[in-house]
Amino acid sequence: MANDELVLLRGGTLIDGTGTAPLPTTDLLFLGDRILGVGAEAAHAAATETARGAVLREVDVSGRTVMPGLIDAHCHITFGEPSSNDELFFHRQSSTAMLLAAFNVPKLLRAGVTGFLDADCIFDLGPALRDGINAGLVEGPRMASGMNALLTSAGGTAGRLIPDSGTLGYAQVVGTRDEMVRLTRQQIKYGADWIKIHVTGSLPNQPGEATVWSLDELRAVTETAHGLNTPVLAHCRSAHSTRLAAQAGVDLILHGSYMDEPALEAVQESGAALAPTFTFLANLADFGSSVGASSAQVDVFRGEIEATAQMMLRAHSEGVRLLCGSESGFSLTPYGHWHARELELFVSEIGLTPLEAITCATRNGALALRMEEGSVGVLRTGAAADVLVVNGDPAVDIAVLGDRTKIEHVFSRGVAVDLDRPWPQRSLLQGEQVGKWSEQLLTQERAGVRPTATTQTQTQSSEMP
């Protein structure tokens, strides 16, 4: 479809993304990447445009739901679905990673995602992919991009795989305050829409994730970024880190795990938004055993969701913006499969209504895209033409958005996405995944080999008092 085609969606039930009640039998008209009219206004605008020579395409969507496209506020499009940090850091050439990202990003559109924030990237691929999408070189949703996440030498979630200095994978290790300022400026110079900080990290002999930045260090980054009109997001998996990030002026806090009263108060005072990103945790807890994931973290991850959800509801009820992010990009969250699950978890775990969850994944997502609220993620005159048509009622059953067979039309920037083509398939690239000799140690007992007489004698001797 040409991007200047005039499209009229007729007779659907419209969810506008603002949280207001659905509007039955409501028309929607758009031309290119701009909505021209909703309801009665659509008919008037259609008459005006056709009188000017525009060709009108009408689509009967009676019995369907028309709503804004989803905005995934926490994605990792360059990671390539690794199953371990080792695989992520040591099995990706930059050229290969870009090929994989270009192959994977159209899957987001097929899942109803018309905008996403790539929170951080390996190498410096994010801004280049964003620009390629904007130029029409790669099919994909609207994209905002971070670059390498800023980490102190204490690291992030990859422990000792993170070097003491320099760059590896998605990580840029910073040591001094001057270095934090310099690299923030450098990332913005090379096209970062956001600056990401890993405020917490995994340290040996410490449970959970520890805060590995000071307030002064965080402010060095936020003040520098804000001085260059660039927002900051932060990975925070503790109440302390969430409070410090908010006090430092971070604009979007990812996870906000175990948030307590002081942390919530700091978030409210700062105006920061929150993206809990429960999907990765819930996928491992609920389905990890079906794909051979370790069971050691199941109770921990379930507990993290339970400990965080109640405060997220408090935050929402007190006016803090919540955004939906899936953390797609890992083997437990492959692209195109789980982007809508966060909405389900907002309903089942946090306690939001389906319409409230939809607003978190549409209107509120404008922040992640660095677009003005009301300009995207809503269906109103003058807004961007990112539109889904769903066979079902997500205002009643939010899970319908996670079923790709129920998504009948996707319009990205006013252009129809081809949903009829086969789902993309590929073979693994040489060296792409970690090669293991075995999953377990090959002991004699596991092999079924009888121990030797010498072994038996040694075992008996060791058991004697």
Image (tube, grey):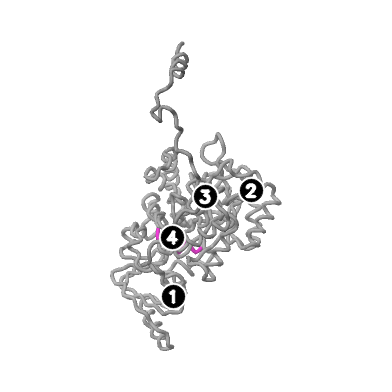
Magenta highlight on residue 364: yes
Q: Amino acid at mark 2?
A: Val
Pointers 4 and 3 in contact (CB under 8 A)? Answer: no
**How far apart are the alpha carbons under marks 4 and 2?**
32 Å
Q: Position of residue 230 (x, y in %)?
A: 61, 61
Q: Quick one: label 2 or label 3, which is nearer the N terminus?
A: 2
Pointers 1 and 3 in contact (CB under 8 A)? Answer: no
Q: Quick one: label 1 or label 3, which is nearer the N terminus?
A: 1
| Residue placed under numbered mark 2 in the picture | 173
Check residue 376 in the rendering and tell me which mark sits there, or answer none.
none
Region of the chain picked out in magenta, as a range = 357-366
| Residue placed under numbered mark 4 in the picture | 361
Q: Amino acid at mark 3?
A: Gly
In the displayed image of the protein, which residue is found farthest to the top?
A: 465
137 w.r.t. 96: above or below: below
- The crowd level at tag 4 (other Cα within 10 Å; few <14, some 14-19, many 20+) is many
| Viewer-nearest of discs 1 and 3 | 3
- The crowd level at tag 3 (other Cα within 10 Å; few <14, some 14-19, many 20+) is few
Q: Quick one: label 4 or label 3, which is nearer the N terminus?
A: 4
- SS for dot 2: strand
Pointers 4 and 2 in contact (CB under 8 A)? Answer: no
In the displayed image of the protein, which residue is found farthest to the right?
A: 178
**How far apart are the alpha carbons under marks 1 and 3?**
46 Å
| Residue placed under numbered mark 3 in the picture | 431
Q: Amino acid at mark 1?
A: Ile
